[in-house]
Image (cartoon, helix red, strand yellow):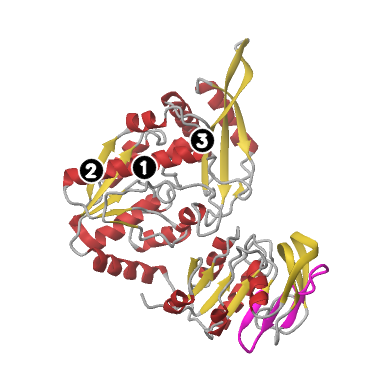
Amino acid sequence: MAREMILVLDFGGQYNQLIARRVRENNVYCEVHTALSIEKIRELKPSGIILTGGPQSVYASDSLLPPVELFELGVPVLGICYGAQAMAHVLGGEVKPATVSEYGRTEVEVVGASKLFSSVEKNSVVWMSHTDRIVTAPENFSVTAATNNCPIAAMEDPDKNFYAVQFHPEVVHTVEGKKIFSNFVDICGVARDWKMSSFVVDTIKQLKNKIGGGKVLCALSGGVDSSVAAVLLSKAVGKNLTCVFVDHGLLRKNEAAQVEEAFSKFDLNFIKVDAGERFLSKLRGVVEPERKRKIIGEEFIRVFEEVSKKIGAVDYLVQGTIYPDVIESGLGKSAVIKSHHNVGGLPDFVDFKEIVEPLRLLFKDEVREAGRELGLPEEIVSRQPFPGPGLGIRIIGEVTAEKVKLVQDADAIYREEIDKAGIKHLAQYFAALTNMRSVGVMGDGRTYDFAIALRAVLTSDFMTAEAAQIPWDVLSRAANRIVNEVKGVNRVLYDCTSKPPATIEFE
């Protein structure tokens, strides 16, 4: 697809996915890649390049460094944190351990004229996270910002459009961060014309060319991601698409029936597979989260393979994988946060010609926008995310039928109370079953039962999130009902942790 794009070269930093978000917020297409050769970079023909942060030192024997040829491509380059240090090192500057490491909120002062800092306040707050720092800028670079402990907090060579910042403009804590990214987009000279309508049209065209007359099986969960993927494929290949909904026994209360009813209204080849006992038997005795995810991921694939043999000669398996799934499952040298069942949880052997993931480079809010472009009803587009492994990762420890019912009932009560209260702004909320048992008293008798944890978060992209401040009376009503109506629970907790350091799901 011929289009302007900004390339993000990933060096393993924790905020790299946010860099792509900030670029796309400017209606510019952006991709994150790692360990690319200079030949591959040339093939991508980026309009600009961003070098990300990372946990390494430029002097370490195994450190990733951008090839010097990258700086000869004639396109603007922005280095962030480790990316700034790597730029300095490769271009002849000097990087050393900082005498005082900086972490968190830091005051920065813009000390020189700069396109990157156009309309940025002279003094503002940025987010630092580094132990090394640039002590000597490369030849022809000028210093454009400084902090008390970091004399070269930003530098640039405006003639070659090379820019570097030691801080993280991508995080919300950097007050002028969005303006800095907007300025870099202007420096790159891109048109700011990447829209979801063009993504939908282009993707359907690509899928038609790729698949032709081949048969396609779509893994349909009923959530927004797989639903949007299904409609994209339906428009591309028509009746050659079969949508398979697997009830793995780990769904929310009454969810299987709701999904089946919702998709009976669409002109799709729809197959429902009841596999609850099968999945529970595979999970028996398993407590480690990554093992649970991988078992569920493999079993999904095996079910799809069996269905494909029944309907005959299926070439492609379609999944609703989105960008946060890919990033959290590990990208290059980035850490694996958790293996998503449709990415890192896949088995080594998959009996399909190819797995097709048309939403792989979209964030959650972009997927919703694509769904609206495709004409999906709002009740599906706005549906709360539900993880593919389902309640299997909302039950800490071993998964059993009894625990599944317990958390289903608690979750249903929590949802009812949120709905009754008219709370509409939550990005995601649910009940999870902890593996903790504690002493309680009911009817003058001692109990020793489970604790339920309630979770609710606010987020736009699901890569970062903050805990929602649910009114106390709503939480109190939900807690009282859960303890009184769900046998086996005698305590209810509320999770007030943000992401990071926590993840949204418990496992």
| Picture disc at residue 288 | 3
Mark 1 residue crowding within 10 angstroms, few (<14) / some (14–19) / many (20+):
some
Q: Amino acid at mark 1?
A: Glu
Image point 78% across, 80% down: which residue?
111
The x, y position of residue 254, in whole percent, is 37, 34
Is label 3 or label 2 in front?
Answer: 3
Q: Are marks 3 and 1 in contact (CB under 8 Å)?
A: no
Of 169 and 130, the residue lying toward us = 130
The residue at the far bottom in this view is: 159
SS state under label 1: helix
Q: What is the three-letter code of the residue carrying label 3?
A: Glu
Q: Secondary structure at mark 3?
A: loop
User: Does residue 161 belong to the magenta stretch?
Assistant: yes
Residue 180's disc is none
Please rate how many residues cluster around mark 2, counting C-alpha atoms within 10 Å: few if below 14, some from 14 to 19, many from 20: some
Q: Mark 3 or mark 2: which comes first in sequence? A: 3
Local secondary structure at mark 2: helix
236 vs 155, nearest the viewer: 155
Circle 3: is it few (<14), some (14-19), or many (20+) Cα within 10 Å? few
In this orientation, which residue lies closer to the viewer: 192 or 356? 356
Report the side of 6 relative to 96 (left or right).
left
Residue for badge 1: 298
Residue 137: give x, y in percent of width and height. Answer: 73, 79
Q: Which residue is mark 2?
A: 307
> Which callout, 1 or 2, points to the residue nearer the camera?
1
User: What residue range appears in magenta?
Assistant: 142-164
301 relative to 14, above or below: above
Image x and y of residue 65, in percent: 59, 70
In this rendering, the answer to whether 465 lies above or below 397 is: below
